[in-house]
C-alpha cells in the first residue's frame, strides 16, 4: 500500500488488514447455505471471568482509554469488570512481572498485558499460564509468543514503518532530511518492532532522502522524554525532525520544541493522542501524526480474552468471532513472531490541521 498517496486533505487512512473485522463484506449470516454462520462465534456473556488489565504503567491517557473500552465490553457481557493495575512508572521495566506471577494466587482467570519488559516477561508469563491463567497481550506483545494465547494488535505492525516514513516525507518534503527516534522503554516490544519496521522501510528507494541519525529512549515518562528531545537537538545541530512512536514521547518532544522556540527548525511527528497534540498542530510544531483507537483496543481485548478464557473460542488461526459493536474478527498467524497469533483491531488515523478539531 502506498501511503504517500495520502496527500493534503486525505488524512484518515483506513489501513485495514484483510483479517480485520468490523467492516467485512462477507458477513456470513447472509450466506445462502448458512454454513459459514456457524464459523463466526458470537461471544456471549453469562460466564465468570476474574481478569486483570495490565498496561505498561499507569498514568498514561491512552491506557486509561483502553481501560474504558474494556470496562464497556465487560458491562455489555454482564461480566465482572477487569481490575486495572500496573506499575506506577514505565521506567520500572520489570515491575509488571509480579502481577503475572501472583495472578493465579489472586484468583485471576485471565491477564491482559501490554508488555513493557521485552523477553524478561517470559518467566512470569510461564508461571501464570502453568497455573491455568489465560494470558492475552495487547498493545505490546510477548516477543516469543510463548504462553500468550493471542496478541490483540492495534494495527498491522508491518505497516508502521511505512506510516512513519511517509509522515516524515510529508512534513519535510521530497528532499527529506535528518531525523531521530525518541522511543519509549528500551524493552518495549511494540516500539522495538515498529523501529525495526521503520529501519527496513528506509531501505526502500522512496525514502532515500530520509536519514535516521539517532535513537533515544524516554521510557514513556514525560520529563525524561522532554530532556531527551532537547539532548537530541544539542547533539545533532542539523536535525530536521523528531519521530516519536509513543504518545508520551511525541507530546513531550513537541512541548520541548515549542518551549525552546525551535518549531521552525525541528518538527515532531510519530504516534500521538489528538487531545494531547492539538496545541502542537495549531502552532505548527507537529503538522502530522497518527494513532488508532485505544478505547476500541481495550474493548476488543476484553472480548477476545473473555471468549478464550470461557472456552467460547479457540486461540487458533482461522477462528472467527464477533466482538460486540466492533463486528467480526479473525485470528491469524502473526507474521512478526513465529508460532504466535494475532488479531488486528483497526486502522491508523493520520491527524493534521484538517481533522484535529478544536479543543
Ligand atoms: C504510548 C505507549 C503505548 C503505545 C503508544 C503509541 O502510549 O508506549 O504502548 O502504543 O504510546
Image (tube, rainbow, N blue to C red):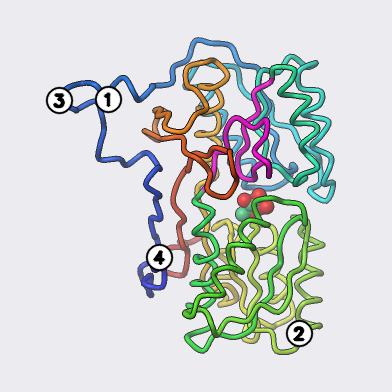
Q: Residues within 10 Å of mark 2 (few under 14, many from 20)?
A: some
Across and down, in percent, residue 144 comes to 68, 41
Residue 137, magenta (yes or no): yes
Q: Residue furthest left?
A: 32
Which one is closest to the eye, mark 4 or mark 2?
A: 2
The circle drawn on residue 295 is none
Q: Are marks 2 and 3 in contact (CB under 8 Å)?
A: no
Q: Residues within 10 Å of mark 3 (few under 14, many from 20)?
A: few
Between 97 and 52, the one nearer to me in the picture: 97
Looking at the image, residue 50 lies above or below residue 12: above
Residue that carries the numbered disc 4 in the rendered image: 11
- Whether disc 4's CB lies below 8 Å from ligand 1 is answered no
Q: Which badge, 3 or 4, comes first in the chain's sequence?
A: 4
Q: CA distance from mark 2 to mark 3?
A: 63 Å
Q: Residue furthest front?
A: 338
From the viewer's perspective, tell me whether residue 56 is left or right of residue 25: right
Which SS class for mark 1? helix
Q: Residues within 10 Å of mark 1 (few under 14, many from 20)?
A: some
Residue that carries the numbered disc 3 in the rendered image: 32
Which SS class for mark 4? loop
Q: Which badge, 4 or 2, comes first in the chain's sequence?
A: 4
Q: Are marks 2 and 1 in contact (CB under 8 Å)?
A: no
Who's the residue at 69% across and 17% down the image?
132
Residue that carries the numbered disc 1 in the rendered image: 36
Q: CA distance from mark 4 to mark 1?
A: 36 Å
Amino acid at each position: 500500500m502506498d501511503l504517500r498517496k495520502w496527500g493534503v486533505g486525505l488524512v484518515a487512512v483506513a489501513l485495514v488488514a484483510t483479517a480485520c473485522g468490523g467492516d467485512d463484506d462477507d458477513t456470513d449470516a447472509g450466506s445462502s447455505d448458512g454454513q459459514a454462520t456457524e464459523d463466526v462465534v458470537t461471544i456471549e456473556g453469562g460466564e465468570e471471568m476474574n481478569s486483570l488489565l495490565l498496561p505498561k504503567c499507569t498514568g498514561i491517557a491512552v491506557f486509561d482509554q483502553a481501560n474504558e473500552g474494556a470496562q464497556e465490553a465487560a458491562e455489555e457481557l454482564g461480566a465482572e469488570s477487569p481490575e486495572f493495575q500496573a506499575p506506577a512508572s514505565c521506567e520500572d521495566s520489570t515491575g509488571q512481572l509480579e502481577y503475572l506471577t501472583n495472578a493465579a494466587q489472586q484468583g485471576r482467570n485471565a491477564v491482559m498485558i501490554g508488555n513493557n519488559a521485552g523477553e524478561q516477561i517470559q518467566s512470569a508469563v510461564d508461571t501464570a499460564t502453568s497455573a491455568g491463567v489465560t494470558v492475552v497481550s495487547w498493545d505490546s506483545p510477548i516477543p516469543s509468543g510463548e504462553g500468550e494465547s493471542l496478541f490483540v494488535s492495534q494495527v498491522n505492525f508491518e505497516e508502521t514503518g511505512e506510516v512513519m516514513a511517509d509522515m516524515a516525507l510529508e512534513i519535510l518534503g521530497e528532499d527529506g532530511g535528518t531525523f531521530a527516534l525518541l522511543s519509549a522503554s528500551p524493552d518495549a516490544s511494540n516500539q522495538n518492532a515498529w523501529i525495526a519496521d521503520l529501519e527496513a522501510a528506509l531501505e526502500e528507494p522512496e525514502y532515500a532522502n530520509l536519514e535516521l541519525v539517532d535513537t533515544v529512549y524516554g521510557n514513556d515518562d514525560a520529563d525524561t522524554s522532554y530532556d531527551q528531545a532537547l539532548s537530541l537537538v544539542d547533539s545533532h545541530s542539523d536535525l530536521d525532525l523528531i519521530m516519536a512512536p509513543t504518545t508520551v514521547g511525541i507530546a513531550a518532544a513537541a512541548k520541548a520544541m515549542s518551549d525552546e522556540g525551535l518549531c521552525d527548525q525541528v518538527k515532531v511527528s510519530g504516534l500521538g493522542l489528538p487531545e494531547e497534540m492539538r496545541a502542537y498542530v495549531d502552532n505548527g510544531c507537529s503538522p502530522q501524526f497518527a494513532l488508532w483507537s485505544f478505547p476500541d483496543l481495550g474493548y476488543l481485548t476484553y472480548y477476545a480474552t473473555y471468549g478464550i478464557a470461557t472456552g467460547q473460542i479457540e486461540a487458533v488461526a482461522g477462528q472467527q468471532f464477533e466482538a460486540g459493536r466492533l463486528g467480526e474478527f479473525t485470528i491469524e498467524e502473526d507474521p512478526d513472531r513465529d508460532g504466535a497469533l494475532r488479531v488486528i483491531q483497526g486502522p491508523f488515523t493520520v491527524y493534521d490541521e484538517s481533522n484535529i478539531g478544536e479543543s
